[in-house]
Amino acid sequence: MSSQSAPAHGVHPQGLTYNLAGIAVLVLLLAVGAAYLIDALGRSAQAPSPTLADPDPISQTISGRELAIPTRWFRFGDQIHPGFTNQIDLRIVLAATDGTALPVDVTLLPRSRARTSATLLDAVYLHQFADTTLSGVPGLVGKPMQDQSGYVGASVWYDALSPNPFVAKCLEAVAEGETQQCVRTVYLPSGIAAIYAFDATVLQSWRRFDPQMEQWLTRIGAY
């Protein structure tokens, strides 16, 4: 009997063509996805700043207080839903004396979860100040924190003449070329605590800070 030779094993040309076509489709899909991502990031960067006249409020309840917050004010998209919550993260824009826009991140919390900056000034900060005094913000006293206090590179700015002073703690810039970031915590008349985070340049307009924050927070019912 004559024997037939077994067919050689290998990649069939047609199968190779399908594999290459599949890879091409995958690359195309990745490219389209990247294009959509870049477009979305661009749209996000060009999103208009929040204003006091913004529509489309979402109703949220925190510390027994019902707030009506425009969707444009939310810092994180996953918080844009009605109902009860124990934390609200917003971004609003204040106006400096020269009209410059000053972004401020606002975190609303139950009062039990925060201590005011004014309370910390008397209870903590005053006992950890270094001997030197900083200058540069008219009307505010600037004091660097002692290194052993655990706040290396931090400073506290406060109004020494007020019984309920403006107080902000600022941390040194994380990277070269960036500015200091400051934090200020207050209790609102509504009983909600508000934590403000902002660029140190906002300190130059500190006298306008609380009156403007009252406008924004009254707008949503938090004040």
Image (cartoon, grey):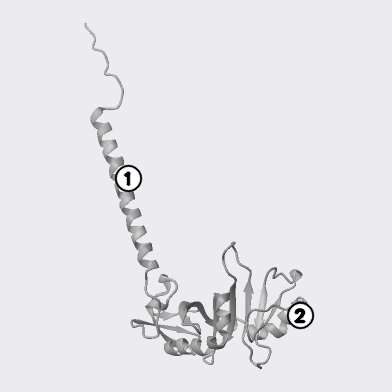
Visible residue check, residue 164: yes
Q: Quadrant of residue 83?
A: bottom left
Residue 65 visible from this viewpoint:
no
Q: Nearer the viewer, residue 101 or 146?
A: 101
Residue at 72% x, 74% y is: 145
The secondary structure type at the circle numbered 2 is helix
Question: Are there few (<14), some (14-19), or many (20+) residues within 10 Å of tag 2?
Answer: few
Which comes before the other along the chain, label 2 or label 1? 1
Q: In this figure, which residue is indicated by the disc labeled 2? A: 127
Please state the horizontal and vertical placement of residue 164, each as a whole percent of the image: 63, 91
Label placed on residue 27 = 1
x then y, percent, for residue 120: 68, 82
Task: Estimate the x, y position of residue 175 in percent, counting from the top left.
Answer: 59, 62
Image quarter where the N terminus lies is top left
Amino acid residing under circle 1: Val
Q: Amino acid at mark 2?
A: His
- Residues at discs 2 and 1 in contact (Cβ within 8 Å): no
Report, in whole angstroms, how far the alpha carbon at label 2 lies from the one at label 1. Answer: 61 Å
| Residue at point 64%, 79% (across, down) | 136
Residue 89: give its label.
Answer: none
